[in-house]
């Protein structure tokens, strides 16, 4: 039975073209992003991003060849018909910059789209294809959930409901009162230790109280 989720092919293995693999599933996942190819929508952590048509096509072109160089000529041919008269270089730059802005990426420290000088661009992440809507970031979310559960279990000992607050405060008050009373008795015995030092019973009580307070 074939796996529902398929990794994009290795850049060194050109046997399976990118477009055919993209069509093997409805959703493309990479990082916090999910692409619904059927609806041509891109979301980030569930929030829809507004991408222009050429920006969306640029993203798909890069996704078809992850880790490989997508030349500026490839983007030009993908985005504009042959008989279109525009400044291709300027328009390619603008389109890629818009894509970076949408992804929260930077040309100086790229996370998703890297500029290859005098050649083109390269996608730095390895996307995944799936027919399941909620697949993206399953391992990370699982790890996060485990960490959250672990933190909750560690803190659970100190969590009290509102009904427990009066009981806890009363217990703390009794403990503090007992400590104050014990300290007062200790000071009393210490101040009267010399006159009573000859009395065996008083001496025994004093030592017992002293051991209890320690």
Image: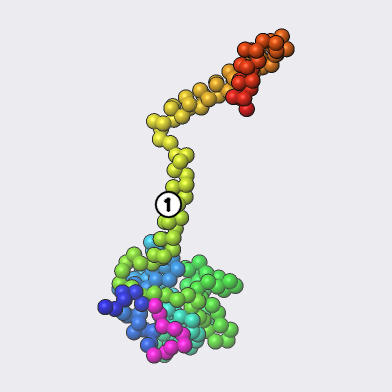
Q: Position of residue 116 (x, y in %)?
A: 56, 83
Q: Quadrant of residue 138 in the image?
A: bottom left
Viewer-nearest residue: 55 or 190: 190
Residue beneath disc 1? 149
Viewer-nearest residue: 203 or 88: 203
Q: Is residue 142 left or right of residue 179?
A: left
Q: Position of residue 99 (x, y in %)?
A: 47, 72
Give SS at disc 1. helix
Viewer-nearest residue: 95 or 112: 112
Q: Is residue 89 left or right of residue 39?
A: right
Main structural element of the magenta stretch: helix, strand or loop?
loop
Q: In the rendered structure, which segment of residues is drawn in magenta?
A: 7-15
Q: Quadrant of the N terminus?
A: bottom left
Q: Residue at x 43, y 27 (%)?
A: 167
Q: Residue at x 51, y 81 (%)?
A: 121
Seen from this angle, which residue lies furthest right?
194
- Say whether residue 11 is magenta: yes
Q: Position of residue 105 (x, y in %)?
A: 52, 69
Placement of 204 over or under 77, stated as above or below: above
Q: Residue at x 37, y 73 (%)?
A: 28
State whether residue 109 appears in this view: yes
Q: Quadrant of the C terminus?
A: top right
- Say whether residue 65 is magenta: no
Seen from this angle, which residue lies furthest left?
1
Viewer-nearest residue: 198 or 54: 198
Placement of 131 over or under 167, stated as above or below: below
Q: Is residue 198 left or right of residue 138?
A: right
State whether residue 54 appears in this view: no
Placement of 24 over or under 166, stated as above or below: below
């Amino acid at each position: 039975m074939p796996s529902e989720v398929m990794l994009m092919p290795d850049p060194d293995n050109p046997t399976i073209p990118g477009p055919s693999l993209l069509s093997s599933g409805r959703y493309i996942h990479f990082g916090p992003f999910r692409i619904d190819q059927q609806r041509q929508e891109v979301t980030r952590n569930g929030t829809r991003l507004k991408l222009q048509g050429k920006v969306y096509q640029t993203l798909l072109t890069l996704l078809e060849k992850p880790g490989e160089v997508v030349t500026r000529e490839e983007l030009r041919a993908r985005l504009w018909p042959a008989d279109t008269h525009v400044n291709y270089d300027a328009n390619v730059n603008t389109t890629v910059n818009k894509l970076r802005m949408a992804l929260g990426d930077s040309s100086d420290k790229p996370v998703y789209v890297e500029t290859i000088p005098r050649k083109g661009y390269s996608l730095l992440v390895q996307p995944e294809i799936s027919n399941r809507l909620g697949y993206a970031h399953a391992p990370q979310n699982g790890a996060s959930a485990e960490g959250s559960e672990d933190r909750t279990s560690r803190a659970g000992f100190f969590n009290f409901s509102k009904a427990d607050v009066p009981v806890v405060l009363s217990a703390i008050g009794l403990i503090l009162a007992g400590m104050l009373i014990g300290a007062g008795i200790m000071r009393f015995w210490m101040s009267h230790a010399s006159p009573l030092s000859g009395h065996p019973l008083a001496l025994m009580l004093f030592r017992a109280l002293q051991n209890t307070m320690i």
